[in-house]
Image (cartoon, rainbow, N blue to C red):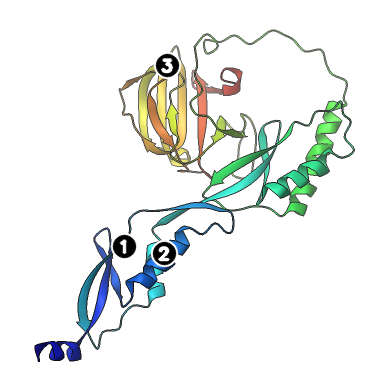
């Protein structure tokens, strides 16, 4: 009798919670789980993988017959909003620098083959393909990329066919050159010192090294941490003082593992690669400064 009264007044449902927060009530938890599993394992549209902050939890309960249950889709949207999606795209590189991004490796190879046509064998365009993992899925159509890169190719060919001036072999010697420097993270160079692009208003003051989010970053040399926090366009930033007026900057970090005043060496994991601040995808922005003035890191690291 009591059970009959309960079933007349109430209906069975599952309360859905994530990280202790109630999302709503659903009738079929298996439907939600199956849809979520399909969403998390979706590899279409250049999706490499997805990460979720926490899994939904279900508790069996009864709700009033007059209570409207949330639609399953609304619950799924709430769960999907807590996930991070990483995309796999392919960058065409010239001399190691990223110039354009397309959606498939096949498109990248076709573009490179087109660019190599009618090029003197003595001219080395140094074309390559870099696999990029990013939170930004933006890619360009193959025809648009080919049109842009043909302009770059023409400029490079013209530059390579100019009479070469006799260059000096005298290497600039600074206190930085005397230091034993280590590469802070392995990855693909996506932007070089002095380059310009649509996302910055002035010449690039550092070296961008693209790699996956969370990759450990080590210090380039022993020193003392003088800044560890968030700083404008740099996002999460670590600054290390190496003495003799030399500083190194590590920007756009996802996490910071050191604090101000801490002594570090070239084996110390100081932070993790991220995409904080003014950034289009996970990478390390590395700066080396001498007496406050940025210098080209590639003169000393690569």
Specify the quadrant of the image occupied by residue 223.
Answer: top left
Residue 242 bears which disc, if any?
3
**In which quadrant is the C terminus drawn?**
top right
* Within-10-Å neighbours for mark 2: few <14, some 14–19, many 20+: some
- Decide if residue 117 is on the left or right side of residue 167: right
Q: Which residue is mark 1?
A: 56
- Decide if residue 286 is on the left or right side of residue 32: right
Per the model, the C-alpha gap separating discs 1 and 3 is 47 Å
Q: Which residue is mark 2?
A: 36
In the depicted structure, whether residue 67 falls above or below residue 122: below
Q: Which tag, 1 or 2, sits closer to the chain's start?
A: 2
| Residue 21 screen position, x and y as percent | 26, 63
| Residue 5 screen position, x and y as percent | 13, 91
**Foreground residue among 233 and 145:** 145
| Residue 156 screen position, x and y as percent | 81, 33
| Residue 286 screen position, x and y as percent | 51, 29
- Residue drawn at point x = 47 percent, y = 17 percent: 246
Q: Can residue 75 be seen?
A: no
- Decide if residue 286 is on the left or right side of residue 52: right
Q: Which tag, 1 or 3, sits closer to the chain's start?
A: 1
Per the model, the C-alpha gap separating discs 1 and 2 is 10 Å
- Decide if residue 183 is on the left or right side of residue 51: right
In the depicted structure, whether residue 82 falls above or below residue 111: below
- Of circles 1 and 3, the one toward us is 1
- Residue drawn at point x = 74 percent, y = 10 percent: 168
Tag 3, which secondary structure? strand
**Foreground residue among 250 and 124:** 124
Per the model, the C-alpha gap separating discs 2 and 3 is 49 Å
Tag 2, which secondary structure? helix
- Residue drawn at point x = 59 percent, y = 9 percent: 173
């Amino acid at each position: 009798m009591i059970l009959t009264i309960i079933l007349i007044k109430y209906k069975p449902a599952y309360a859905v919670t994530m990280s202790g927060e109630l999302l709503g009530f659903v009738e079929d938890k298996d439907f939600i789980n199956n849809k979520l599993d399909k969403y998390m394992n979706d590899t279409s549209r250049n999706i490499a993988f997805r990460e979720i902050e926490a899994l939904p939890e279900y508790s069996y309960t009864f709700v009033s017959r007059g209570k409207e249950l949330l639609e399953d889709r609304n619950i799924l949207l709430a769960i999907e909003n807590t996930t991070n999606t990483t995309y796999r795209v392919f960058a065409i590189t010239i001399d190691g620098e990223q110039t354009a991004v397309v959606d498939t490796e096949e498109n990248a190879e076709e573009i490179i083959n087109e660019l190599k046509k009618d090029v003197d064998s003595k001219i080395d365009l140094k074309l390559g393909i870099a696999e990029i993992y990013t939170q930004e899925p933006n890619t360009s159509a193959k025809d648009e990329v080919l049109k842009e890169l043909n302009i770059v190719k023409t400029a490079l060919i013209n530059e390579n066919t100019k009479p070469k001036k006799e260059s000096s072999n005298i290497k600039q010697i600074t206190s930085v050159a005397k230091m034993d420097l280590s590469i802070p993270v392995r990855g693909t160079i996506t932007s070089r010192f002095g380059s310009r692009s649509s996302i910055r208003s002035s010449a690039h003051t550092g070296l961008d090294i693209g790699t996956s989010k969370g990759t450990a970053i080590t210090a380039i040399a022993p020193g003392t941490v003088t800044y560890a926090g968030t700083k404008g366009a740099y996002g999460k930033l670590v600054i290390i003082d190496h003495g003799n007026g030399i500083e190194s900057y590590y920007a756009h970090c996802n996490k910071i593992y050191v604090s101000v005043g801490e002594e570090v060496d070239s084996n110390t994991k100081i932070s993790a690669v991220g995409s904080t601040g003014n950034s289009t995808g996970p990478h390390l922005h590395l700066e080396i400064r001498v007496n406050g003035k940025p210098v080209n890191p590639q003169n000393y690291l690569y």
